Amino acid sequence: MFLNRLSSEQKELFLDICIHASKSNDNFSDEEKLVIEQYCDEMHIDVRFDENNPADEAAAKLAELSTPTDQRIILLETASLLLSDNTYDEDERAFYESLAAKLGVSREQADSVIPMIGELTDLYGRINEFVFG
């Protein structure tokens, strides 16, 4: 939704984060791959499912390159990816919390994102039910 705001370098690093996030619970699901494909389309970059940078390096570089708004976008979109397969386990939670800390997003802000994504998912479900019956 907001990924077009990122620079080319940020986009590639964000894709690395997405790949690491998806693999964090050893279950790189088809839903997560679909979201990554959609993100790449939105960012106008080539799709890949192998990371180019270790997670810690990608997160550190993103923190360095990004404004606070960019950091919140990265965290929001990562959360959306992690929730896309309707599984949010301890490994994914640990990855998400670690990413938030590395990006410098406050714990309070990071904790507010997951429920927001849930509310948005519920709203989309209701809209689809209205439109498609």
Image: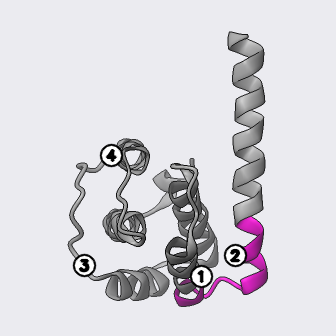
Q: Position of residue 103 (x, y in %)?
A: 55, 84
Q: Position of residue 115 (x, y in %)?
A: 77, 60
From the image, state whether disc 1 or disc 2 is nearer to you: 1
Magenta stretch bounds: 101-113
From the image, state whether disc 4 or disc 3 is nearer to you: 3
Q: Nearer the viewer, residue 66 or 129?
A: 129
Mark 2 burial class by Cα count in 10 Å: few <14, some 14-19, many 20+? some
The residue under label 4 is 44
State the CA–CA distance, disc 4 to disc 3: 20 Å
**Colour mapping used in the image:** one colour
Amino acid type of the residue tagged 4 in the rendering: His
Q: Which sits earlier in the primary sequence, circle 4 or circle 3?
A: 4
Q: Secondary structure at mark 2?
A: helix
Q: Which sits earlier in the primary sequence, circle 3 or circle 2?
A: 3
The residue under label 3 is 53
Confirm or deny contact between disc 1 and disc 3 (CB under 8 A).
no
Mark 3 burial class by Cα count in 10 Å: few <14, some 14-19, many 20+? some
The residue under label 1 is 97
Q: Secondary structure at mark 4?
A: loop
State the CA–CA distance, disc 3 to disc 2: 23 Å
The circle on residue 110 is 2
Q: Position of residue 100 (x, y in %)?
A: 59, 81
Confirm or deny contact between disc 1 and disc 2 (CB under 8 A).
yes
